[in-house]
Image (cartoon, rainbow, N blue to C red):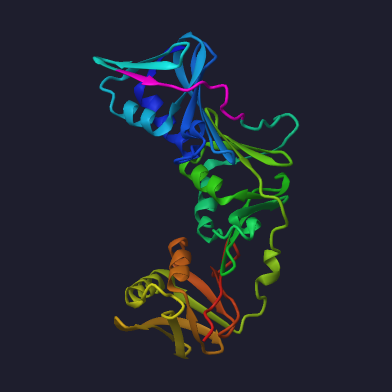
Amino acid sequence: MKFTCSRDDLVNNVSIVQRAVTANSTVNILNGILIEASDDNKIKLTGYDLQTGIEADVEASVTEKGAVVIDSKFFGDIIRKLPEPEVDIISDNNFQTTIKCGQAEFKIAGLDPEPFPKIPEIEENEAEKIVMGQKILKNMINHTIFAVSRDNSRPVLTGSNIVSDGSVLSVVSIDGFRMAINREDMGNDFPKINYIVPGKALTEMSKILSDDEDAEINIYTSMQNLLFDIGNVRMISRLIEGQFINFDSIIAKNPKTVITINRKQFLDAVDRASLIIMTDDRKCPVRFLSNNPSELTVQATSARGNLQENIDISLEGDLIDVDFNSRYVLDVLKNIDDEIIKVEVNGGQGPCIIKPVEGEKYIYLILPIRR
């Protein structure tokens, strides 16, 4: 194998593919990136951890076709330190690989690509397809991914439910203590879909997606796999099997208390309270207390000391006295852009709902800490 390509293009795409490479796998070949030169004008890089695979095409001048697997971290470290803008890579029949750039020349051992696992293929003409803006999907993921569960005993909650009723697309994450929903109106011609995508795949995909308003992504799904296609980069992930929680059923329709509050003031007060709170959030929660309909008191007490701060609000319904995990509240408030938000409280045991003053573009649910 022999090809020449741009160092910067190679570095950028290796960085993307590395997101799917297993760190310190006992299966040595999974620590590597598969480099294939099977076309005259491009090479393909592949990383695959048996759950998520990423392929990236890099423009190149290929003079000899072939393939090799090179340790991902080692290869990435080398190419990032190359001195010139153009790099030559040559691999012989024993997979010994030469990397030349300017006056620098590395000779390293590669691996036979034959044992590298094959990424599942989705036949695009037979798969369900949706097309949407990259920035829209990126924002929907980023505003919900923090609520994905890390508890593997409930596999369906380790992913986000991506579901559409034919016009509104929702991304939903639940970890058993909180829920995050982000919705986007996609128009009446949008396909009906319902699948659960692993949180890891969505996290890595969000880092690849563009902020360009005009950039689009094609998403293909089969029974078991999902393919994100943004042109020169493709990510494929296994879907999580099972039935996701009926999230609409756990949203209280008639809250006991409705509070309208400035999001930034609320965020800053809880953030200050978190300085007092020790690592055990259950023993040291943040307390929200209202003695009148126009003021909310944020309190925190621990061995470190205490904090009390009052915020102007508008409250309808019952006065409140309820405890929450401060980290859960901060995660929600940091992912909202609105200046004014609505907080619905259902006593000391029912879930708290945070949503827009108008509409339901986003809904966040947090369970209180029982005393």
Along the viewing direction, whichever of 280 and 5 lies nearer the viewer: 280
- Residue 335 vertical position relative to residue 87 in the rendered view, above or below: below
Q: What predominant SS class does the magenta segment belong to?
A: loop
Q: Which residue is rendered at x = 45% and y = 87% of the image?
A: 289
Q: Is residue 356 left or right of residue 269?
A: right
The region drawn magenta spans 106-118
Q: Is residue 225 left or right of residue 291?
A: right
Measuring from the top left, give residue 74's x and y in whole percent: 36, 30
Measuring from the top left, give residue 58's x and y in whole percent: 46, 22
Whether residue 36 appears in magenta in the rendering, the answer is no
- Residue 291 vertical position relative to residue 103 in the rendered view, above or below: below
Whether residue 117 appears in magenta in the rendering, the answer is yes
Residue found farthest to the bottom:
291
Along the viewing direction, whichever of 255 and 63 lies nearer the viewer: 63
Measuring from the top left, give residue 69's x and y in whole percent: 48, 24
Q: Is residue 266 at all visible to an observer of this figure?
A: yes
Q: Is residue 210 at all visible to an observer of this figure?
A: no
Residue found farthest to the top:
63
Q: Which residue is rendered at x = 43% and y = 22% of the image?
A: 110
Along the viewing direction, whichever of 310 and 367 lies nearer the viewer: 367
Residue found farthest to the front:
26
Q: Is residue 368 left or right of residue 8?
A: right
